[in-house]
Image (spheres, rainbow, N blue to C red):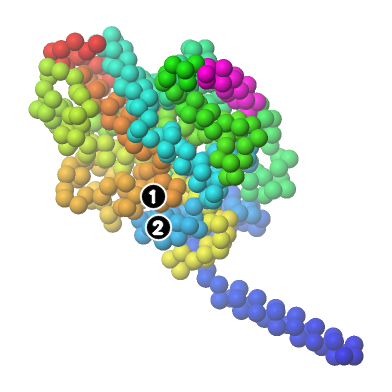
Amino acid sequence: MDSIQFSVTIYALISLLTLFFLVAWLRRKPLPPGPMGWPIIGNMLMMDQLSHHGLARLAEKYGGILHLKMGYSHAIAVSSPEVAREILQEQDHIFANRSTTIAITYLTYNLVDMAFADYGPFWRQMRKLSVMKLFSRKRAESWDSVRDEVDAMVKSTAVNSGSPVNLGELVFSLTHDIIYRAAFGSISHESKEEFISILQEYTKLFIAPHLADFIPWLGFIDPAGLNTRLPAARAALDRFIDKVIDDHLRKRKKIRDQNADKDMVDEMLEFYNEEGKVNETEMLTRDNIKAIIMDIMFGGTETVASAIEWALAELMHTPEALKRVQQELANVVGLERRVEEADLEKLTYFKCVIKETLRLHPPIPIAPHKSSADTTVMGYHIPKGARVMVNVYAINRDKNYWEDPNTFNPSRFLQNGAPDFRGSNYEFLSFGAGRRSCPGMQLGLYTMEMALVHLLHCFTWKLPNGMKPSEINMEDVFGLTAPKAIRLVAVPTPRLSCPLY
Ligand code: HEM
């Protein structure tokens, strides 16, 4: 082949390839609708609208699936049950990764936990361990710690009867105590204080976006000081949990010899090997153990506490519902004894109160997912690596599925065939659905039910200083969870004729 022929052939090949890619690009489905962005930064100026409220407002304009360009990355907000079904059921295998940030990656020791690990053999292994060993109903110690700590809460409330009780603080301290005990066994007051301050810094860092998450070459601009705060926070956690692990390793022999109760750290140490590679040998390293502990702390404390506080706030805000649930308790249990676990199944209206609270106030208002491949959803192109925000808050209030969606009305769940939150009704996604749905649902529900049923049965609650129900502030704040913006305060008086402790 002479050089002219060679050049023509190369030219023809390049033209064909260009044409092929051009046609493929032109035939590609469009991105979902969304607001216009700026060059390079895209929609980053709308960052403050990425809360469940902001995205719900945008969905009213753009629909159940909308697209935002955040610097170099694509973000998709899902706000309708139909789109959620497509993402969490039909294409669950493509959307089973979590979207993460630089902060989350660093704080989870490079995603070696369960909540943020990419979907695959490693995540499966971690999930199996958590479901079977840590959150399982068979692990009686976790369930015992719920009962004991609820008893302690009833006692401390009874001691304060007649005076205003900050119910928000009460239930947050309850869930912290339950999870600490379940995770670490006994823990001193000073250690608990130290751990709470580590958790508080983690909570702030987890939701702090870094400019480099969206425009990687701008990492040197760091107004929130993440480049120094991240290593400091992780070093504090290392110091704390290394000591916990060493103490547990020392006590290990005693536990085996005396057949004593095991906490979650003991359970994980059964699989401990510093050199372990989880997917090959089913072993856990220290980093795995630390990262899983943080999953449990974040998954199991604020979620449950905010749900209990919201249930009490909604009931006090809707006195007919409060009266009805307490009347049911008086009829089914009676005012001569405290509630027992076996009573729960007979408390039909109480169960509806739990469901209605979780519908209106899903503790995790946005479930973060990520696409692992290019795909098409509802006729729109979703690029590989897009951050997918499933707006559970907006979906649970979709007016096409729920009558009077913003009203607290537990009776809606008395109807036959009412939706449930166990993952097959895509209009009720409080625990998520599909592969990444909540593994702590049973433990979370049990804690919520036990705390709430005792507070409602043992005490009559009045608002302080003549406050009217309509004056309760019902706003939330957006973070990892969406708790009440202003804590609920109410005055308890004992309701039963038997002693409370
Ligand atoms: C009322 C209580 C709770 C609610 C409403 C709740 C809700 C959720 C939701 C919505 C998700 C994300 C689902 C998705 O992406 O589709 C999730 C994941 C998770 N939850 Fe819960 N949760 C609760 C309690 C708990 C408890 C008590 C624990 C542990 C002690 C826990 C541990 C986790 C973990 C580890 C994940 C991540 C699972 C994974 O990515 O594979 N949760 N939860």
Residue 25: x %, y % from top left: 61, 73
Residue at the farthest left position: 331
Q: Quadrant of the C terminus?
A: top left
Secondary structure mainly formed by the magenta segment? helix
Q: In this orientation, does residue 244 appear?
A: no
* Ligand 1 position by quadrant: top left
Q: Nearer the viewer, residue 224 or 494?
A: 494
Query: Element at badge 1?
Result: loop
Residue matched to label 2? 89
Point out which mark residue 348 bears.
Answer: none
Whichever of callouts 1 and 2 sits on the residue coming sooner in the sequence is 2
State the CA–CA distance, disc 1 to disc 2.
8 Å
Q: Nearer the viewer, residue 390 or 123?
A: 123
- Mark 2 crowdedness (10 Å alpha carbons): few <14, some 14-19, many ≥20: some
Q: Residue at x 61, y 79 (%)?
A: 23
Residue 411: x %, y % from top left: 17, 42
Q: Residue at x 42, y 18 (%)?
A: 260
Asked whether 240 falls inside the magenta stretch, the response is: yes
Image vertical order of residue 91 relative to residue 298, above or below = below
Residue at the farthest front position: 257
Report whether 431 appears left or right of 40.
left
Q: In this orientation, does residue 122 appear?
A: yes
In this picture, which residue range is highlighted in magenta? Answer: 234-253
Q: Quadrant of the N terminus?
A: bottom right
Asked whether 75 falls inside the magenta stretch, the response is: no
Point out which mark residue 433 bears.
Answer: 1
Report whether 70 appears left or right of 303.
right
Q: Amino acid at mark 1?
A: Ala
Q: Nearer the viewer, residue 453 or 111?
A: 111
Q: Is mark 1 within 8 Å of ligand 1?
A: yes
